[in-house]
Image (spheres, rainbow, N blue to C red):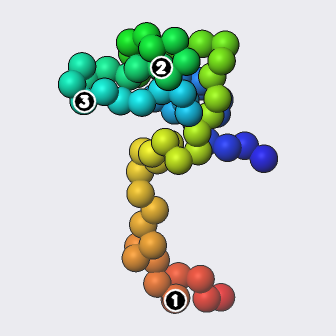
Amino acid sequence: MIIRGTSSPRCSLCEYAFFDTEKEKYVCKINDEVKEKDDSCKKFSYDIFKYKPKKKNLFGKFSKEDFEI
């Protein structure tokens, strides 16, 4: 199974990073370093709740008639 977001490790998806609104950067909880959004390291641990899909599902786009034979 492929989980979206895991193929490209980056600080914005890591469980150890949090966004500091004061500095407007990501900060690592492990070594307290300021990181960029796309930075990554060997201790990367994917947090599924930080992943934001790029496009939304369009559930209202199709009708019941579109799936009838």
Return the x and y of residue 8 as percentages of the image width and height: 59, 25
For the residues labelled 3 and 1, the Cα–Cα distance comes to 48 Å
The type of residue carrying mark 1 is: Glu
Q: Name the residue type under label 2.
A: Cys
Residue 21 locus on image (x, y percent): 24, 30
Residue labelled with disc 3? 21
Name the residue furthest right.
Answer: 1
Give the residue drawn at x 38%, y 22%: 26
- Residue at horizontal 52 percent and vertical 12 percent from the top: 31
Total residue callouts: 3
Q: Please, is residue 17 above or below residue 2 in the view?
A: above
**Mark earlier in primary sequence (3, 1):** 3
To which residue does mark 1 refer? Answer: 65
Q: State which quadrant residue 5 falls in.
A: top right
The residue type indicated by label 3 comes to Thr
Comparing marks 2 and 1, which lies closer to the viewer?
Answer: 2
Q: Determine which of the numbered discs, if any, sits on residue 28 in the image.
A: 2
Q: Vertical placement of 58 versus 62: above or below?
A: above
Report the front residue among 38 and 28. 28
Mark 3 or 1: in front is 3
For disc 2, the neighbor class at 10 Å (few under 14, some 14 to 19, many from 20) is: some
Task: Identify the element where label 3 is drawn.
Answer: loop
Residue 8 placement, left or right of 28: right
Relative height, residue 15 to residue 63 (above, below): above
Closer to the chain start, of discs 2 and 3, is: 3
Characterize the local packing of mark 3: few (<14), some (14-19) or many (20 or more) Cα atoms within 10 angstroms.
few
User: What is the quadrant of residue 47 in the picture?
Assistant: top right
Work out how far the residue at label 2 is from the one at label 3, CA to CA, in angstroms.
Answer: 14 Å
